[in-house]
Image (cartoon, helix red, strand yellow):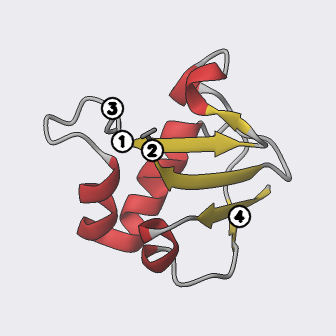
């Protein structure tokens, strides 16, 4: 099945620029599985930006949005299965006032 991955800010450069990345993934791939696929494709810089140093999940400074919904609002969070045509956006958390 095909999905689309977009990056914002520093993720845009790691994912190859401003163009959306269309990926063919296996049916049943989870959001966490996708992040691991992207780590395999883009290497250490991606891993360092996304994953916690202890290997237990993603950094709190990373926001993964699936079809407009932040990953923490998905029923199964990172274990949520992806579907044909899903759009995933990777962006750093932006806070401030």
Q: Residue at x 55, y 65 (%)?
A: 8
Q: Secondary structure at mark 4?
A: strand
Q: Residue at x 24, y 67 (%)?
A: 44
Q: Residues within 10 Å of mark 1 (few under 14, many from 20)?
A: some
Q: Secondary structure at mark 1?
A: loop
Q: Mark 1 and mark 3: span between their CA atoms?
A: 12 Å
Q: Residues within 10 Å of mark 2 (few under 14, many from 20)?
A: few
Q: Earlier in the sequence, mark 2 or mark 1?
A: 1
Q: Secondary structure at mark 3?
A: loop
In this view, the residue in front, 24 or 21, is 21
Q: On screen, 86 above or below 74? A: below
Viewer-side label of 4, 2:
2
Residue closest to the far left: 54
Q: Mark 2 and mark 3: span between their CA atoms?
A: 16 Å
Q: Residues within 10 Å of mark 4 (few under 14, many from 20)?
A: few
Residue 1 point in image, percent of width and height: 79, 55
Question: Which quadrant of the view contains residue 48?
Answer: bottom left
Q: Earlier in the sequence, mark 4 or mark 1?
A: 4
Mark 1 and mark 4 in contact (Cβ < 8 Å)?
no
Residue 68 point in image, percent of width and height: 76, 41
In the picture of the structure, the residue carrying the numbered disc 2 is 93
Q: Mark 4 and mark 2: span between their CA atoms?
A: 27 Å
In the picture of the structure, the residue carrying the numbered disc 4 is 24
Residue 86 point in image, percent of width and height: 79, 49
Q: Mark 4 and mark 1: span between their CA atoms?
A: 27 Å
In the picture of the structure, the residue carrying the numbered disc 1 is 61
Q: Mark 2 and mark 1: span between their CA atoms?
A: 5 Å
Question: Which quadrant of the view contains residue 42?
Answer: bottom left
Mark 1 and mark 2 in contact (Cβ < 8 Å)?
yes
In the picture of the structure, the residue carrying the numbered disc 3 is 57
Viewer-side label of 4, 1:
1
Q: Residue at x 38, y 60 (%)?
A: 39
């Amino acid at each position: 099945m095909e999905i689309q991955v977009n990056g914002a800010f520093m993720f845009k450069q790691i994912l190859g620029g401003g163009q959306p990345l269309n990926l063919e993934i296996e049916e049943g791939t989870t959001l966490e599985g996708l992040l691991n696929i992207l780590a395999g494709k883009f290497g250490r810089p991606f891993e360092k930006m996304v994953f916690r140093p202890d290997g237990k999940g993603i950094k709190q400074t990373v926001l993964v949005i699936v079809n407009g919904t932040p990953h923490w609002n998905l029923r199964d969070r990172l274990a949520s299965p992806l579907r044909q045509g899903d759009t995933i956006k990777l962006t750093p958390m932006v806070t401030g006032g």
